[in-house]
Amino acid sequence: MNAITRSLIVAVMLALPGLALAQTSELYLNDGETTVTYVVQNGQLVRQFNRSGSVDGPGLVVQDTIKMIGRHSGGVGREYALDGTPLAGRYPNPEFTDVFDGATNGEHNWSVAHNHFPDFPVVVGDADWGNLQRSFVPQRRSSGITYDANTGTLWLANNVGGTDRIQQYDLEGNLLSEFNASVQGGYGLAWDPADDTLWLPGSWGTSDLFQFDKQGNLLQRLPVKGLSQRILGAEFQFGGGGCGEKAKLKVKCPKNGTKVRGKLKKANPNVLVTFRLDGGQAQAAQTNNKGKAKSKWKGQEPGGHTVTVCDLEESC
């Protein structure tokens, strides 16, 4: 989609407020003052459950299960099934203050220690929140964080009482891009792999959800009946659902391997999956009604490459 086409779509959306963009993925939202976790889809509250306590989250990551991180030093987060059933996992916070949100690429989890004076760092651990440590200090104090699998980068919501800017960083902490975003609250941030957009929950004065494209255009402001005004953590499911026993992966490396294409077929329909190139570069995708999904990479080193998705692996 070129810039002109994108601008026309945004203009139509803003001109027709009754026309809503579908939110097909489930968005997981944690209340910051109670133990409630909400799940929202297509602007509707589809289910909710209670966490074990007030320091169980609100920072979270969502894959095949939900993994909360303890809110502050000594706090312990727990693991839950997607329907809220408690599971065995326990995830203690070793030292950081007020990790309100979470992000994952399936190998590492990130959060922002929003009230950890004096520098309010981004922190990183393994996929089970283990070995949690400082990663980098963002240029502006932040709270919401999410991983963008299409670019392999992190997005942060700059927040002190309300969000005024959203910034994109690489995993080493280098600022790549930013745009202004004025949202009351906005302590969580979630990247939706289904449409490559960013979602920011309002709080402390509004329970609306705000959807942005990655150029900073506000696509919609979505009211959700029954949602709390105290939302902190926010995440979509990353690479969950599984491919299924009949799934098959085909990989091609045209242009002497400088381009790589992966095609998945006969997988479970309408699930999120994550393609990885050579064990590193990740791309999230959602299978269609026929269980098909695809990925592609450009500008790679010439030669052979390996693509994985779920438990499938193929080389070219």
Image: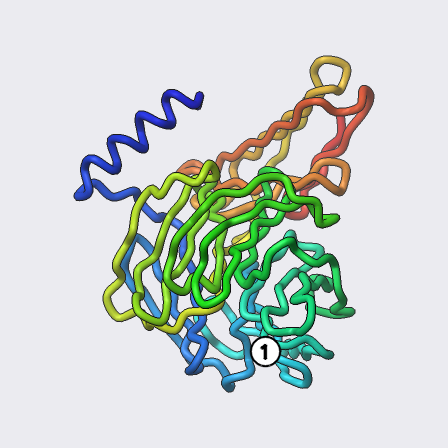
Where residue 208 appears, as percent x and y from the top left, is 30, 60
- Foreground residue among 219 and 148: 219
Q: Residue furthest top?
A: 255
Q: How is the image coloured?
A: rainbow
Location of the C terminus by quadrant is top right
Where residue 247 appears, as percent x and y from the top left, is 57, 40
- Foreground residue among 100 and 42: 100
Please, is residue 26 above or below residue 57 in the view? above
Please, is residue 78 above or below residue 1 in the view? below
Residue found 48% across the figure and 39% down from its top? 214
Q: In this view, does 314 lie to the left or right of 161?
A: right
Q: Is residue 145 visible?
A: yes
Residue found 46% across the figure and 69% down from its top? 232
Q: Residue furthest right?
A: 303
Q: How many marks?
A: 1
- Foreground residue among 154 and 263: 154
Where residue 198 appears, as percent x and y from the top left, is 45, 47
Residue found 56% across the figure and 54% down from its top? 156
Q: Can residue 65 be seen in this view?
A: no
Location of the N terminus by quadrant is top left
In which quadrant of the rendered view does residue 122 lie?
bottom right
Amino acid type, callout 1: Arg
Tell me the residue that label 1 is attached to: 71
Please, is residue 297 above or below residue 241 in the view? above
Q: How crowded is mark 1: few (under 14 residues within 10 Å), some or many (20 or more)?
A: many
Q: In this view, does 174 lie to the left or right of 186?
A: right
SS for tag 1?
loop
In which quadrant of the rendered view does residue 281 lie?
top right
Where residue 117 appears, as percent x and y from the top left, is 67, 74
Residue found 31% across the figure and 29% down from its top? 9
Q: Is residue 38 left or right of residue 263?
A: left
